[in-house]
Image (cartoon, rainbow, N blue to C red):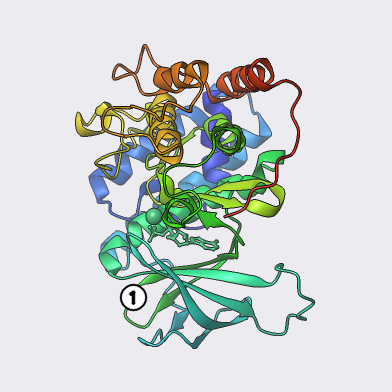
Amino acid sequence: MQELDVVCEQIECAQHPEDIFGVESNKVLVKNIFRQLSKVVHPDRNNGDARANNAFVKLTEYYEGAIKKLTNGTYGDTLSEEQTNVSDSDSFTIQTRKNTYTITKTLAEGDLGVVYGGQIIGSVDDNSYKDLIAVKVVDDSADNDLMQNEIKILQLFKNNPANQLKHLPVLLDRFKTSDGQLGTIMKYIDGYDLYSIREGLRWKYGIDQKHVVWMMNRTLSAIGYAHSQGCVHGNIDPSHIMIRPRDHNAWIIDWCYGALNPAQTGDGFKVLNEEFSAPEVAQKKPPLPASDLYSIGKTMIFALGGDVKTNAMPASVDAALQRFLKFFVLESPRQRAQDAWEMHAMLNDLVVELWGPKKFLEFQI
Ligand SMILES: Nc1ncnc2c1ncn2[C@@H]1O[C@H](COP(=O)(O)OP(=O)(O)O)[C@@H](O)[C@H]1O
Ligand SMILES: [Mg+2]
């Protein structure tokens, strides 16, 4: 994508000044970001291009809004009008401008907070999953910026439809608790993350390679799309890949740590994942698409029952597949696999080479 497209898109997707200037910001930072972005969309530079003009007008409004909010102390507060009481129990109601949601159970404990399960009130229960929701609320409002980051990225995906959206979380709504914690409402994913699958008895020693390859195929496709939108996930691990056995769908979730157009914006890594992060994360280098590929390699080695520290894999894993995965986990980002879609195509070829034309194998957990 051209720089102009990237910047226009960022501005068009924004709903608040914070979406452009970051939740944690100050006047100097806001001014610098404004200066950089306005250079790209300035009418003088773009021969009156309508999209650039509109972006420039919107950017100027957000800039003025940001300065005003920084002056009156409300900067960072994007949702104060929608507040919900989230009790310690796992059944409560959330009211937003858009809808009412009931929460009925706890689905999982994430790194930032609890993920609850529930339903949109008023939806007809026709035994489909379409109206079921997953609600993520941060434990500590200090992490609101990470949640805001996920909202920004999921909105970007929503605004750029592609086949791969079926592998990505769908954001429906958001809210703020009376204690100021940010929450998101997403479509419920009726799948299991890779940790839970490996925790079960069936795949205790590793998932069969003929299943891991389709999981990796979906993952590479989804990540290729995210990369095409300028987004590096930044924290791929087994808890962030969800699998639905019945149709072999897979989702890449938890975009809280994503970096958007890092080369242009300076957006960096936000978390170090001990076993799954590429070496450049600890070295505080800029996020690269190849950093996600490293984490995908490690995650698939884990899925196969391998050792993520040494990259050793069970002997039952075909040597060619082992070689392919080792290309993902090379320490040097320049030497390792670079392009998710290219790797997706290579994996397809490898699978056909190893096992002949593809066929659907039932996956049970
Ligand atoms: N949309 C969803 N539907 C069903 N379960 C989900 C959904 N999103 C997350 N989960 C579950 O919650 C866990 C934590 O989610 P995650 O987005 O990683 O939260 P955190 O940012 O707190 O780590 C996931 O590993 C998964 O098991
Ligand atoms: Mg997580």
343 vs 69: above or below: above
Image point (41%, 57%), residue name: 148
- The answer, for residue 162, to whether it is visible in the render is no
- Left or right placement of residue 105 versus residue 329 in this view: right
Residues 84 and 280: in front is: 280
- The answer, for residue 183, to whether it is visible in the render is yes
For the view shown, which residue lies furthest in the top direction? 335
Image point (48%, 17%), residue name: 319
Residue 121 in percent (x, y) is at 66, 84
- Left or right placement of residue 24 versus residue 183 in this view: left
Count of marks placed on residues: 1
181 vs 279: above or below: below
Q: Is mark 1 within 8 Å of ligand 1?
A: no
Q: Determine which residue is flagged by label 1.
A: 180
Residues 46 and 151: in front is: 151
Residue 81 in percent (x, y) is at 46, 78
For the view shown, which residue lies furthest in the left direction? 283
Q: Amino acid at mark 1?
A: Gly
Residues 275 and 42: in front is: 275
- Left or right placement of residue 214 versus residue 33 in this view: right
Q: Secondary structure at mark 1?
A: loop
Residue 306 in percent (x, y) is at 37, 34
Give the quarter of the figure containing the N terminus.
top right
223 vs 129: above or below: above
